[in-house]
Structure formats: C-alpha cells, structure tokens
Image (cartoon, rainbow, N blue to C red):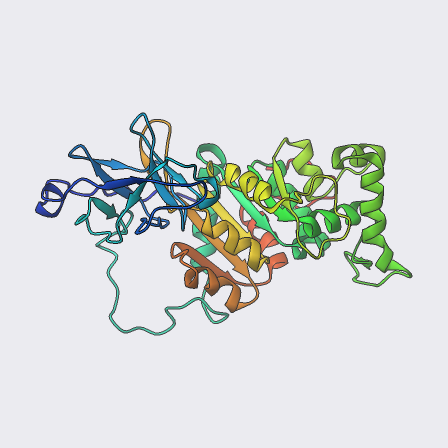
Amino acid sequence: MGFSLRPYRHPDFTKKQFMDAPDAVFVPTDRDFVAPENYHATAIFPEYFKIGGQWKLAPESRMDCVVVREPDGSLSVKEFRNLKKGDAVCVGRTEDASEGIYVHTTAFYDPKAGGEAFAFRQGRSRETAFSVDYDELYGLLEHEKHHGSIVWVLGPAVAFDSDSRKAFGQLIANGYCHALLAGNALATHDLEAGYKHTALGQDIYTQTSQYNGHYNHIDTINRVRRYGSIPAFLQAEGIHDGIIYQCVQNHVPFVLCGSIRDDGPLPEVYADVYAGQNAMRDCIRKATTVITMATTLHSIATGNMTPSFRVLPDGTIREVYFYCVDVAEFAVNKLADRGSLAAKGIVTNAQDFVVNVCKGLGLSIDENGAKSE
C-alpha cells in the first residue's frame, strides 16, 4: 500500500500581482470580541499577507476567523470570541493579492490530473464507486500512523454494532487513532455495551431488545458518575473492551462535547460549548488526517475548524486529509456546502466502513482487543 503526500506548490511571489501589491492593512479593535469593519475572514486554505514588503503565511487557519498581527510581528488566527481590544486585525475583502492578502486555493492542485469538462457521476452518492477511496485510505492510514496525527469524529452508531465496536477498538490499539472527538452518546453507548452488552437496550450482536433495556444507558451513566470518572468505572467494573476503553488503555485523548439533549451526562463531557470547542481545536491543531463518521453536526463543526494544510515543525507544509463517512448523501455533501471543500465523502454504513478499514489494514477483530498486526 504505497502512499506519498502530494507536494505543496508555493505561490510565485516574483509575479507582478505580488510584486506590485501593497502591504496588508491591520486595524486595531476598539472593544473585546468585535472585529473592525471590513475585516478579512479566513478560509480553510493557506493565506499569505504582505507585511513590510514580504509575504508571510499565517501558520494555521480555520474557517470564519480573523487574522491578527501580534506585537512580535507574527500572525495568528483567532475566533471573534477571543479578540481583545487593541488586537491588530487584517482588513480587506479581496483574496487575489490586490490588498496584500492572498488565499492560495491551488496549493495541492496537480495540473496533470485534468479531467473531462463533462462527465457522469462527479458527485459523491450511493452510486459512487469507492474501491479506490478505500485503497487510498489504507495507504494514508499506514503513513499517518508513523508520520502524522489521525483524528476520528464518531457518532454513536459505531458503538451500536458488536463488530464495528471491536474493529474500532483495534484501530485504536494498533495506532491508527491519535485523538477521538464525539458527544455524550458515543461514549455512553460504548460503555453501555461493555457494561450491559447493549446499546440503547438492544444486544449489540443480536439486536434483541432486553426487558427494561431503556434503562441501560442511564444506568450506565449513573454508575460512571458514582465512580466519578470513566477510567474509574472501567477499572471497578472490570471492562476490558470497547472504544473508550482502548482510548484510556492507549492514552489516546478523547473530547466529548455536550448537547442540549444529553442524558446525564458522563463526567468527562464538556457542558460549556466554547470550552468543548477549544478542546476539539487543540486536537485539530495537530491533525493531519480527519475522518468523521455518522454525525452530521460534529462533522460540520470539525470541518469548520480544520484547515487544508499543516505547517510541520521543520517548516514544511503538507496537506490535511479529511473524510466524511455517512449513510446519508446529505451529510457527506453538507460539508462542501458549508465551505469544507477539501472533504471527501464516502456514502456507506458507518459500521461496515469501520470493519472494512480494520480488515483492509490487516487487523483481525477479536474479543480482547489485543494488538494483532
């Protein structure tokens, strides 16, 4: 499964449009949390700003934020809620260098790729052939295991099935997950599966509903809260399998963000939406591959904070890969509608996807979650 990153194509700043461009303009904010008029809003692409006659890359980005020139001359990308009075914010609504701002949308574009002007099935739908996507993904994950940071974003459906739950546990145990983002439901039903062998009261293998099974998930939450934390619950109840267990066992950080509809919630769930967003972004800042599955809102939230590039410690720039997996075409196409144009959609059942990926990487699915490469 050979894999190589697409090269980053730097802008040619010797071109006239860059040489003749003025310096970017930065205007201080006059109050906290409010950007100046005509502020420049960021996208997912690399963005350059001309300062003192030199083009500087903002080292990270995310959608719908502003660029601040720090006192030391460096550039930072900030959410509006993090602006402070006096911050020097870039202004200008053009992106072609004419105002000292250049958005580099073709950084990873291969001009040799080409394509027909008219062709059938160019969208991502249930009729799309995904064999090549799986093969590329296997190669990418092998590369990222050793050279990147893989962040998964999961909905609870992954924990509803015995095989997909075991398969994802194997991905974690074997180094193919470096951070997990989810909500209260994913963790609750995964822990319920370990505690009661059910998810929402249904056996995770036979799908048979248990008597009074609708109590099982809240019994699980209540039990975890009695112990005070998820790790304490796992240890006290002797649970040695599942998604969250493997995260704890392998020291993989997980961020659980709350919802208005949550039961409980579990002790580790962020109740403050902005604290949760900050914790998610801390993981995304390191991500080089992001895979979201069966969770439309978490997928869009993650897509909005994920840039298309990453500046590595040695100064090189590489692409960030983003996949969205869902059984609904609406979900995988919604990301593109919301501006996450680099997202690749795979329309399939999330449980089948996880099992296929696990097997495609040469991992077996066993009960104890032992490493099995």
In this rendering, position of residue 45 left or right of residue 280? left
**Is residue 295 visible in this depiction of the protein?**
yes
The quadrant of the rendering that contains the N terminus is top left
Work out whether residue 311 or residue 100 is closer to the camera in this orientation and state it. 100
In this rendering, position of residue 357 left or right of residue 97? right
Work out whether residue 369 or residue 68 is closer to the camera in this orientation and state it. 68
Number of labels in the image equals 0
Work out whether residue 5 or residue 103 is closer to the camera in this orientation and state it. 103
**What x and y, as percent, mark residue 372?**
63, 37
Location of residue 275 by image quarter: top right
**Is residue 369 visible in this depiction of the protein?**
no
- At horizontal 59% and vertical 43% (from top left) the residue drawn is 276
Q: Is residue 271 above or below residue 238?
A: below
In this rendering, position of residue 38 left or right of residue 13? right
Q: Is residue 355 above or below residue 225?
A: below
**What x and y, as percent, mark residue 362?**
56, 44
**What x and y, as percent, mark residue 345?**
46, 60
The quadrant of the rendering that contains the C terminus is top right
Location of residue 86 by image quarter: top left
**What x and y, as percent, mark residue 70?**
34, 31
Work out whether residue 119 or residue 18 is closer to the camera in this orientation and state it. 18
- At horizontal 84% and vertical 59% (from top left) the residue drawn is 214
Q: Is residue 116 above or below residue 89?
A: below
- At horizontal 55% and vertical 63% (from top left) the residue drawn is 348
Question: Residue pushed farthest front?
Answer: 30
